[in-house]
Image (cartoon, rainbow, N blue to C red):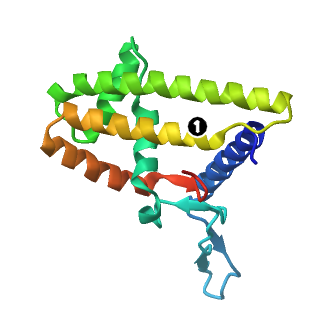
Amino acid sequence: MITYKKMLIFVTLVAALGLAFWQYQSPHVYAHSQPKNGMCQTVSAPEVDASPPDMIDGAKYPELISDEIAYRLFFVTVAAPEGATKEQKARQRAYLRSAGLKEEEIQSAFGVLATFKSQYDELVGRYNDSVQSANETDGEPDLETFLTQQDKLVVSTKWALEAAISPQSVSQFEAHLQHEKRNMKIAKEAR
């Protein structure tokens, strides 16, 4: 069973690899021997896939990222707490506009996402406490229950958001989310 500490190390490693890959993606050109005409020949570096084999790269395989994971990542990224600062609200508003919500729908979405953030933070906090307790007693935390509760929270948030916006905005939001899968990278075992 994966402990919280191992999961944290894995996530940190994946983030570091992602940063290294992002920095490496700038074009590299190498000069080879100079021919007699004085002109340098250049050859582009071969393409390297720096994604670990246990990762799904949404840029290549967006269809392998489930809608549930995409919704969760969007909600976690966009949700601001109750009583958010002006900067947090402006950031959230920008995300929601780009996702296709109309200005009059954004205020309702703020409430839905604040509820999600509160419940998600509470859920993660409870799970982290159970991991700490399990580590102290050499037990195993109940990851399956956490994942099930997380999935239920994402689905109920999706339904609440759909109820708060127009059918046209729901369609635009879903299309936006499908497009955003191309910017995601997840572990294959992620759920």
Q: Residue at x 60, y 77 (%)?
A: 42
Q: Which residue is drawn at 67% across and 52% down?
A: 17
> How many neighbours does mark 1 have within 10 angstroms: few (below 14), some (14-19), or many (20 or more)?
some
Answer above or below: position of 128 versus 9. Answer: above
Answer above or below: position of 183 versus 164. Answer: below
Q: Residue furthest bottom?
A: 36
x, y percent for residue 106: 23, 27
Amino acid type of the residue that numbered disc 1 sits on in the rendered structure? Phe
x, y percent for residue 48: 63, 70
x, y percent for residue 39: 59, 80
Q: Which quadrant of the structure image shows residue 168?
A: top left
Q: In the shown orientation, is residue 166 left or right of residue 28?
A: left
**Mark 1 residue element:** helix
x, y percent for residue 68: 42, 49
Q: Which residue is drawn at 46% across and 21% down?
A: 118
Answer above or below: position of 166 versus 46. Answer: above
Q: Which quadrant of the structure image shows residue 131?
A: top right
Q: Which residue is drawn at 36% across and 27% down?
A: 113
What residue is shown with label 1? 146
The one of 96 and 144 positioned closer to us in this rendering = 144
The one of 115 and 80 positioned closer to us in this rendering = 115
The one of 87 and 135 positioned closer to us in this rendering = 135
